[in-house]
Amino acid sequence: MNIKILVAAHKQCEMPKDNVYLPVQVGKALHPDLDLGYQPDNGGENISEKNPYYSELTAVYWAWKNLKADYVGLVHYRRYLGMKHGKDKWQCLLTKEEAQTLCKKHDIILPQKRRYYIESLWSHYEHTHDISHLEKTKGIIAKDYPEYLPAFNKVMKRTWGHMFNMFIMKKSYADEYCAWLFDILFKVEKQIDFSTLSAFDARLFGRISELLLDVWIETKGYSYKEVKMIQLGNENWSQKIKYFLAAKFFGKKYTQSR
């Protein structure tokens, strides 16, 4: 079983030694002189130059169009999937053998749900980003993919979601998902004036897609298996909660990644 888990990265960093992982340099087309020694996302058919807007999705698009594998996945240079607990987080990352065992039993592997408790996915986006982006997305789904609209409405009312665009899934499923996802995102892109957006706000397609993965799974009725999301480095949860509450109750939108 050939499984390739992309590790999206834009800078040099420590990478897993297990060959199930494929480090991908995202936005390579914008930095032709920067060679991290990773698979560039600008080979073959690609959208590498859109990385400031699509973030890690430029790696996903590259894999969709160019990678041959039975299963394909995406993690980040500081966020991985795993099944173990331990002080040494590098020892907890999903191994090739563990990935093979999971994929023999399940078509889709996802990180554990991120719960927002007092926010729905829609209201959280509204409080932290420009809600017109989601409204445009909903309009395109209603027009071009109306069979997905009930799931969209259902997912947006949830207080949890499978975030970070992290997954491992059968390549045929990933191809199906990407064809649907990028068609929607490219149509939203045509309705956005990027000249008015900061570099942080311009990364909107990475955020929208985080919400659309569950919409696609819900509509298709596909089952999935959740595993741990392993964060390398420290997460400042007190600061995250502070900004989360400030966004909800005082309308202070995010201006940097949380």
Image (cartoon, rainbow, N blue to C red):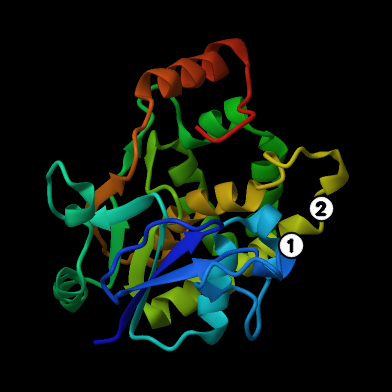
* Residue at position x 63%, y 24% in the image: 253
Image-based side of 176 in relation to 195, left or right: left
Q: Work out which quarter of the rendered image holds the N terminus and state it.
A: bottom left
The image position of residue 94, as x and y in percent, is: 22, 62
Q: SS for tag 2?
A: loop
The residue lying toward the viewer, choosing from 104 and 54, is 54
Q: Residue at x 57, y 72 (%)?
A: 61
Q: Which mark is residue 187?
A: 1
- Residue 146, position in %: x, y? 59, 61
Give the number of callouts: 2
**Residue 79 image offset from top left, x and y in percent:** 37, 50
**Residue 35, image quadrant:** bottom right
Instruction: In the rendered structure, find residue 154 and report the number of the disc placed on it.
Output: none
Q: Seen in the image, is 101 located left or right of residue 62? A: left
Proximity of marks 2 and 1: CB atoms separated by less than 8 Å: yes
Please tell me how crowded label 2 is: few (under 14), some (14-19), or many (20+) other residues with Cα within 10 Å: few
- Residue flagged by tag 2: what amino acid is it? Gln
Q: Is residue 254 above or below residue 75?
A: above
Circle 1 Cα neighbour tier, 10 Å, few/some/many (<14 / 14–19 / ≥20): few
Dot 2 corresponds to which residue? 191
| 236 sits left or right of 192 in the view | left
The three-letter amino acid code for the residue at tag 1 is: Lys
- CA distance separating discs 2 and 1: 7 Å
- State the residue in front, 211 or 37: 37
Q: Is residue 106 visible?
A: yes
Q: Which quarter of the picture shows residue 254?
A: top right
Q: Residue at x 72, y 38 (%)?
A: 132
Q: Secondary structure at mark 1?
A: helix
Q: Is residue 193 visible?
A: no
